[in-house]
Image: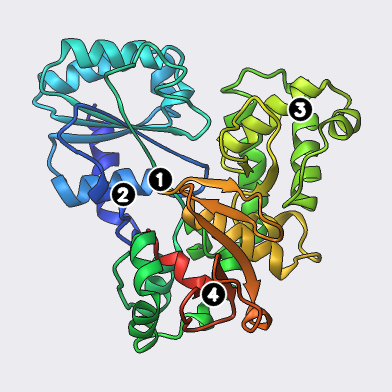
């Protein structure tokens, strides 16, 4: 165990976490079993270590372990947790929990048999901790870690820290909010960079971002989707091709019959694969109100704008980027549906109709809708700068 303590101490002391993630304040840390999900590359490991540094420093009552370690091929989590608890341990941070067979049963055992020991674990966004895991039902509190918001990206680029706003605050007071922000920074000077590479924290690393993102996407398919959903490896090429076909034409109404023919599988399998890609945070699905999976989605979007560039680097349309950014920014705390109105992309929270447009639409507005306007610094009335929706978290 001393080797794990040495590793923990080194990682906590050398962690590079330039942004304090907002999720840190959303989690109820008094709970004894906390699961943090997120897509590959959004910084789950850094988040765990950031929590350890902020709340414990290098105290030995907290310990980070990664289940990728070969030690756990011959030792159980239960054994390790028991020894840690007997030596005064209070908080065990477990990374990559899904790599360990029978992890949910052992976490339940720890919860029920080691009073006073808190476990915080990370896992893939593909994991369904509450819906598909009856073992931990009622025990685990689950949270999602997302990539950087535009607000966090602006802080990284400028050092200027801004609060996040609710959608209601933006709708009611966007002119004043945008004006206050623009007095301190010029958001449009950073917006295109964020759209291209700002969502994933690894853009800060001195590596080729595009190659790193492609590697991350493939690892997501190979491990998070194929491994967790227990799909035969021979079918991986079908899922990869499906992602490519969807991403290169998104936003689009998926033609399930055509897609099934393209990847040589059934319609039902295509719909299931689309759901897996959505769970993996590679795509988003949009339905009309009252509709949901397993029905075919009304529209499919790529999850975030960085992924758009990775799939179609020479065919990126501003409208596609704008709609993708809007969906991704609002998705955390709002309900998005497809609008029935012509040329209106989104119905938000069942009451707000949104069009995503550029500045040329300024003289053609309809008072029944809100407009998220690209390349606009400060809006007016129902015309709201698109970039401002990046300040929702």
Q: CA separation, marks 3 and 2?
A: 33 Å
User: Which residue, as the protein is rendered here, is positioned at the far bottom?
Assistant: 183
Work out whether mark 1 precedes mark 3 in sequence or the reverse, and give the earlier one.
1
Task: Tell me which corner region of the image, top left, top right, bottom left or bottom right, holds residue 141.
Answer: top left
Work out whether mark 3 precedes mark 4 in sequence or the reverse, and give the earlier one.
4
Quickly name the residue at label 2.
23
Q: Name the side, left or right, on which 53 lies relative to 181.
A: left
Quickly name the residue at label 3.
270
Dot 1: what SS? loop
Q: CA separation, marks 4 and 1?
A: 22 Å
Work out whether mark 2 precedes mark 4 in sequence or the reverse, and give the earlier one.
2
Q: CA separation, marks 2 and 1?
A: 7 Å
Work out whether mark 2 precedes mark 1 in sequence or the reverse, and give the earlier one.
2
Tell me, yes or no, whether the two marked residues, 2 and 4, touch with CB atoms within 8 Å.
Answer: no
Image point (39%, 16%), residue name = 103
Image spot of residue 363 (x, y percent)? 64, 84
Quickly name the residue at label 1.
145
Q: How many marks?
A: 4
Image spot of residue 327 (x, y percent)? 56, 54
Work out whether mark 4 precedes mark 1 in sequence or the reverse, and give the earlier one.
1
Q: Name the side, left or right, on which 64 lies relative to 344.
A: left
Dot 4: what SS? helix
Work out whether mark 3 precedes mark 2 in sequence or the reverse, and give the earlier one.
2
Q: CA separation, marks 3 and 4?
A: 35 Å
Quickly name the residue at label 4.
191
Q: Name the side, left or right, on which 258 lies relative to 40.
A: right
Residue 281 position (above or below residue 256): below
């Amino acid at each position: 165990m001393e080797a794990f303590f040495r590793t923990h101490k080194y990682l906590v002391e050398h962690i590079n976490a330039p942004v304090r993630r907002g999720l840190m304040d959303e989690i109820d840390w008094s709970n004894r079993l906390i699961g943090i999900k997120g897509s590959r590359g959004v910084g789950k490991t850094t988040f765990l270590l950031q929590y350890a540094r902020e709340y414990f420093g290098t105290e030995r009552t907290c310990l980070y372990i990664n289940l990728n370690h070969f030690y756990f091929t011959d030792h159980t989590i239960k054994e390790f947790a028991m020894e840690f608890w007997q030596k005064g341990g209070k908080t065990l941070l477990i990374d990559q929990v899904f790599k360990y067979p029978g992890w949910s049963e052992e976490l339940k055992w720890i919860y029920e048999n080691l009073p006073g020991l808190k476990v915080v674990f990370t896992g893939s966004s593909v994991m369904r901790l509450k819906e598909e895991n009856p073992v931990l039902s009622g025990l685990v509190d689950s949270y999602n870690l997302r990539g950087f918001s535009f607000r966090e990206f602006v802080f990284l680029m400028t050092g200027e820290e801004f609060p996040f706003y609710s959608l209601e605050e933006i709708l009611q007071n966007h002119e004043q909010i945008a004006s206050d922000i623009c007095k301190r920074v010029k958001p449009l000077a950073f917006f295109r960079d964020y759209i291209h590479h700002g969502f994933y924290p690894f853009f800060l690393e001195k590596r080729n971002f595009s190659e790193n993102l492609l590697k991350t996407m493939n690892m997501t398919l190979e491990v998070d989707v194929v491994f967790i959903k227990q799909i035969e490896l021979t079918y991986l090429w079908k899922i990869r091709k499906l992602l490519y076909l969807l991403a290169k034409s998104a936003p689009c109404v998926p033609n399930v019959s055509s897609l099934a023919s393209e990847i040589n599988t059934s319609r039902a399998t295509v719909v299931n694969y689309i759901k897996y890609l959505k769970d993996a945070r590679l795509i988003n699905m949009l339905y009309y109100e009252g509709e949901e999976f397993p029905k075919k989605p009304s529209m499919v979007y790529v999850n975030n704008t960085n992924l758009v560039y990775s799939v179609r680097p020479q065919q990126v349309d501003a409208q596609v980027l704008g709609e993708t950014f809007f969906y991704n920014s609002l998705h955390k705390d709002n309900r998005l549906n497809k609008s029935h109105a012509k040329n209106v992309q989104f119905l938000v929270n069942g009451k707000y109709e949104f069009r995503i447009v550029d500045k040329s639409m300024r003289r053609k507005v309809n008072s029944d809708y809100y407009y998220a306007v690209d390349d606009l610094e400060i809006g007016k009335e129902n015309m709201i700068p698109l970039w401002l929706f990046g300040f929702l978290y």
